[in-house]
Every structure is written in structure tokens, then in C-alpha cells.
Amino acid sequence: MPQYRIAWMPGDGVGNDVMDAAKIVLDTLKLDAEYIPADIGWHFWCTEGNPLPDRTLATLKETNCALFGAITSKPRDEAEAELAPELKGKGLLYSSPIVALRQTFKLGTNLRPCKAYPGNPLNYKEGIDLVVFRENTEDLYSGVEFHPVPDEVRQTLAKHNNKMNKFDHVDAQDLAMSCRINSRQACRSIVTAGFEYAKKFGYKTVTVVEKPNVIRETSGLMIRTARNVAKEYPDIALWEANIDAMCMWLIKNPENYGVLVASNMFGDIISDLCAQLVGGLGFAASGNISDEFAVFEPTHGSAPKYEGQYKVNPMAMLLTTKLMLDWLGEVDMATRLETSIATVIKEGKHRTYDMGGSSSTLEVAEAVAANL
């Protein structure tokens, strides 16, 4: 019986292409695993009205972790238009399956390393080694939204905050509301994860990226919690930065920073900026992690125009595979894989189009596998 059962979820578009690349590497490493197919993505929304079928959730509960490719996501009206005829008009609303996975399995930590590997022509600067810890289940992604805003919601809010009065003249149909909800427990969990990572891997600072001077309560809660957590790690400095200023400082001096911690929306923003500093989303890996389960995914989209062409950069997927191996405790395999990835990047013989080369997705994966 295999040691690991891994849910295999290519998803949409080039998700299939990069997952094929991952399989080449995993087979070469001879990971003792069974790969269990699981349905997810736009096709299942269109044909079933659910991009994350219940059968998939049941499958995931019988596995150690999941490896996920990419997802197509569209706004409400476009999603409704692409439903099968028999499903239209039934009140079905599209919601992101990856957000649903994070919330269903309480995957509170989103880990996004962004490292400048020597020889990558897309590096902004050499020496960048950033790791973003993004709280993964709360904040503006909580899904507490209204449009139109019901009268009882407006009246309740007005009782507690007279700033709502400025919207009295706005018709409910012309008013939309998204609630930013952060809990102390989640703030503490993500900050602690950042400090523990810094302690384990020798980072000297943890920078909490928020906006407490304007978003006083939710960002304020994150900052206050971080200050308390920092007292438990006297050898690691806590830095605090506003999200807008942090974007500027990362462009100016990215090598000055190491571990970054942020709430869900700000973490999403800052991690894409960090990814671009080290070559773009073609190098952006991530893990959605809890103590019991994890879903690993590259952060790029499904790029439907490239589907099946095996043109896109597989490095994000291969670095994601490295994160999965680390989480499974296969540290030697993970180290070998990262070393091989770094070697292929440095040699520069196998590069996809985004790096100025002409290699295919699978050719790059085969080069990485050969170096293993």
C-alpha cells in the first residue's frame, strides 16, 4: 500500500499541462504515493452548477493532501451565461472552489515563497528571498456580502456607527457591501506561523503588512496581536508596514525583507508583487495549510489560450511540488528537487517563452528530472 494518497486536481486550462510536468518529476523522485483523481473547475460549474462537487470533498477527506493545477473564475453574469441550459434560472451562484477548499478544511495558512534563483533573466534583483504568510480564511474573503443591502442591515449598522448616515440617500439597489472580518485567533495563528518559519530558517525580521491608520479595527487587531506574539520571539525583530508603503519599499529594497505576514486581501496583493520581483507568476508557488491537511497550488491562472500547448512555465508547479514534499516530511526529496530547479534555471539551456526561450513545459520538467 502506498505511503501517501494525494488528490490529483488539474483543474482548468494549463492546470493540466503543469500537472503533467509535476508527474514527470514525482515519478523520477519515486515518491511512494497513489494519485487520486478529483473533479474541480469550470467544466463542473458549467455542467453541474458546482465547481467543487461533493464527491470531490469526500475524496479529499480520504487523502493526505492535494496537488492542484489552476482554476478559471468569472464574474457572476458571465458564469450564469455559461451554465448548461437546464441549469440556468435556478439561482445558482458561482463561488471560487479554492476559497471553498480553504474554508472547508480550515487551511488558515497560505505560504508563498518568492526567491530569486541565480541565472533567471526575469529577476528584479539578485538576493531576493521573501516568504509571504497570508491569512487564508477570513478578511474580505469571508463571503459576507450584500447587494442590494437589506434595510435591516443598514439600520443595524447605523445604530452602531453614525458614519452609515452618509449613505441614507443611496437606494439599496445602488449600494453594495463586503464585510472585512478578522478574528484574534486567526491573526495570532498566521503571525505565529511567520515567526516560527523565521526562527526555523534563520530570518532576522518578520514584517506585518496592514493599514491600521485607516482600517483601525481589523488591521489594528492584526498589529496588536503581532506585537504580543513578537514578545515570544525576542531574537526576531517585528517590523510594521502599511500595505501601500510596503509596495513601494519592496520595489526599492526587496533584499531588506524576509518573512512578510498579512491578512487575506493584503497578502494576496503583496504576494503577487513579490512574485513579479523573482520572475512573475511562472515562479510563484503556494501551499494552503492546516495541521491536518493541505492543498498545494501554483498561484498563476488557467490561461485558457495556452491550454494543451505545453507552452507555459512549469517552475511554479514544480516549486509547489517541493512545498508539498516538505509538508509530507520528505525533506531530502524536496531539497533535491529545489537544487535541480535552481540548476536548470542557472544553466539556462531550457527556458519557456516567458524567459526568452523556446522549450516546452514538458521539456523543462524533463530537464529538472534529469538533474535529479
Image: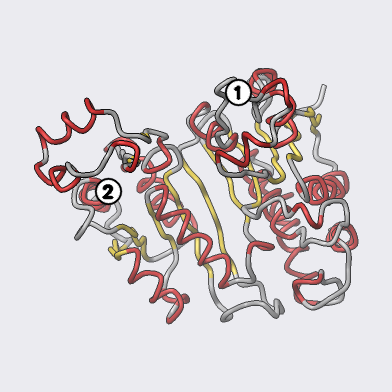
**In the displayed structure, would residue 127 be above or below residue 155?**
below
- Residue at 69% from the left image edge and 62% from the top image edge: 282
Residue 114 visible in the picture? yes
The residue identified by callout 1 is 89
**In the displayed structure, would residue 325 be above or below residue 115?**
above
Q: Amino acid at mark 1?
A: Gly
Q: Quadrant of residue 56?
A: top right
Nearer to me, 182 or 325? 182
Nearer to me, 253 or 157? 157
User: Cα distance, mark 2 to mark 1?
Assistant: 41 Å
Q: Secondary structure at mark 2?
A: helix
Label annotation for residue 325: none
Q: Residues within 10 Å of mark 1 (few under 14, many from 20)?
A: few
The residue identified by callout 2 is 222
Q: Is residue 213 left or right of residue 252?
A: left
- Residue 73 in percent (x, y) is at 62, 43
**In the displayed structure, would residue 109 be above or below residue 251?**
above
Contact flag, marks 2 and 1 (Cβ < 8 Å): no
- Residue at 38% from the left image edge and 53% from the top image edge: 262
